[in-house]
Image (cartoon, rainbow, N blue to C red):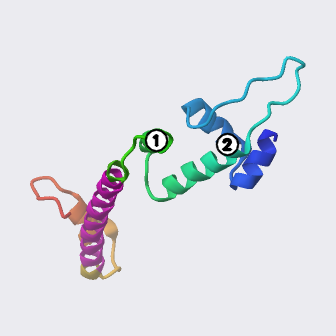
Amino acid sequence: MRIGEVAEKAGVGVETIRFYERKGLIEQPRKPADGGYRSYSSETVNRVRFVREAQCLGFSLNEIEELLTLRADPETDCADVRERAQAKLDEVKNKIARLAGIQSALENLIQECRGDGPASSCCPILDALDTEDKESMT
């Protein structure tokens, strides 16, 4: 099948297919000697879908490359994959905690600001952002 069909079946754009090829996540088929179109296998569609789903779960392209390597190795133990998923979950939880701190700081700043008067002279939000000799809010 041609690149456009692979892209359509996998739910991505043609440029995404080309990007994955450049990154080594999928193989680029050889161009035929007669100058025709490259032909992709149905496995390419599955691989692109795998990459896309892994990205949706927050895995980086490097991490996805590792997962693809584990997937292809018949000696891979499921515990290896689980370990990587657990590490990603821990990373996500840490990000959520940091975002909760940012949310709280913003809520406090908004609550302190009346929203009237000139910002240049008495805005508690701008004053709080001027962190010289102050501790970080988050």
Foreground residue, 33 or 114? Answer: 33
Foreground residue, 83 or 58? Answer: 83
Other-residue count near label 2 (Cα within 10 Å), few / some / many at <14 / 14–19 / ≥20:
many
- Residue labelled with disc 2: 44
- Which residues make up the magenta segment? 82-110
Which x, y percent locates residue 36?
88, 26
Q: How many marks?
A: 2
Compared to residue 46, the image places residue 35 above or below, namely: above
Compared to residue 102, the image places residue 134 above or below, namely: above
Say which quadrant the N terminus sits in: top right
Kind of residue at disc 1: Pro
Residue found at the far top of this picture:
33
Which x, y percent locates residue 92?
33, 60
Q: Is residue 40 magenta?
A: no
Kind of residue at disc 2: Thr
Compared to residue 32, the image places residue 124 above or below, namely: below
Foreground residue, 27 or 16? Answer: 27
- Residue labelled with disc 1: 74
- Res. 53 in view: yes
Residue at image location 16% in from the left, 59% down from the top:
136
Say which quadrant the C terminus sits in: bottom left
Q: Is residue 95 magenta?
A: yes
Query: Distance between the Cα atoms at labels 2 and 1?
Result: 19 Å
Other-residue count near label 1 (Cα within 10 Å), few / some / many at <14 / 14–19 / ≥20:
few
Mark 2 or mark 1: whose residue is earlier in sequence: 2
* Most frequent secondary structure within the magenta stretch: helix
Residue at image location 90% in from the left, 19% down from the top:
34
User: Is 64 on the left-hand or right-hand side of 34?
Assistant: left
